[in-house]
Amino acid sequence: MVELNDIRVSFDGQPVLNGVNFSMRAGEFVYLVGPTGAGKSSLLRLLYMDLKPEAGTVHVSGYDGATTRERDIPHLRRKIGIVFQDFKLLDDRDVYENVAFALYVTNTRRSEIKKRILHALADVGLSHKRNQMPQELSGGEQQRVVIARAIVNAPSLLLADEPTGNLDPSASAEIMELLRKINTRGTAVLMATHNYELVRRYPARIVQLKDGKLFEVELRER
Ligand SMILES: Nc1ncnc2c1ncn2[C@@H]1O[C@H](COP(=O)(O)OP(=O)(O)OP(=O)(O)O)[C@@H](O)[C@H]1O
Ligand SMILES: [Mg+2]
């Protein structure tokens, strides 16, 4: 599903990732933790091929970073779902059209597109808000729209970069429940987070970035 080997990434001559190895199996749920600036977002960017490593190899969902052409990267991104901390919804169109956005570029039939969008919105509990504009939704609801958009193509991998970073505890818990549900159905989830409270409440494998390296972490208290 995901395999990083001996990765090096630097910015302005400063190494951020230096000898990172990481692999993730299909269907796994993994938390990516580490202090601010440790390179969590950079690691996720490697996986959706928004960043190339100076050294090392990247394999994601059957794509090899070394041989994937620029024009194939959009295909990869449609096979994985991506969720950011700041919701990144298009504010000139309603909820339905935001979720539809990723589908119109594919060769999917209109009726099939509609079916998938309505399913995804039902999954995140927002069917009744499908004609609202993003500005009319709470932060938690906006993030659920982003998740609907991320799962509408039924991805085998979901990458989430601090998806609860801007949300209060109750909205954060809803997002977690949703990510766990999506994971239970077989989508692997890699979630970068600072929220140790959530990590304790929803235990899963934890990897930590520190001083350019990646370590497995044992969860001590439950
Ligand atoms: N495009 C860039 N240009 C220059 N430096 C960058 C760039 N992207 C990241 N960095 C630097 O690389 C380091 C790692 O950044 P990254 O965003 O991956 O960390 P992070 O673990 O996601 O941090 P946070 O928890 O604050 O989100 C930081 O020192 C950051 O300033
Ligand atoms: Mg980050």
Image: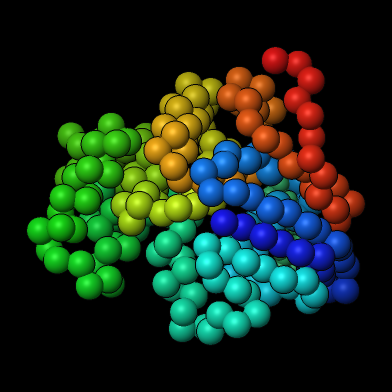
Q: Is 204 positioned to the left or the right of 163 in the image?
A: right
Q: Quadrant of the N terminus?
A: bottom right
Taking depth in this image into account, of 166 and 203 the one nearest to the observer is: 203
Which corner quadrant of the image does residue 153 belong to? Answer: bottom left
Which color scheme is applied? rainbow
Extreme-top residue of the structure: 222
Name the residue located 86 percent from the left edge and 62 percent from the top edge.
18
Residue 42 seen in this snapshot: no
Q: Is residue 187 above or below residue 221?
A: below
Residue 221 point in image, percent of width and height: 76, 16
Name the residue located 85 percent from the left edge and 47 percent from the top edge.
210
Q: Is residue 179 above or below residue 174?
A: below
Residue 174 point in image, percent of width and height: 44, 27
Which corner quadrant of the image does residue 185 belong to? Answer: top left
Q: Quadrant of the C terminus?
A: top right
Extreme-left residue of the structure: 111
Count every numbered label the image shows and give the total.
Answer: 0
Q: Is 147 positioned to the left or the right of 20 in the image?
A: left
Taking depth in this image into account, of 155 and 201 the one nearest to the observer is: 155
Residue 89 seen in this snapshot: yes
Residue 7 point in image, percent of width and height: 79, 66
Q: Is residue 199 above or below residue 54?
A: above
Name the residue located 32 percent from the left edge and 63 percent from the top edge.
102
Name the residue located 54 percent from the left edge and 49 percent from the top edge.
26
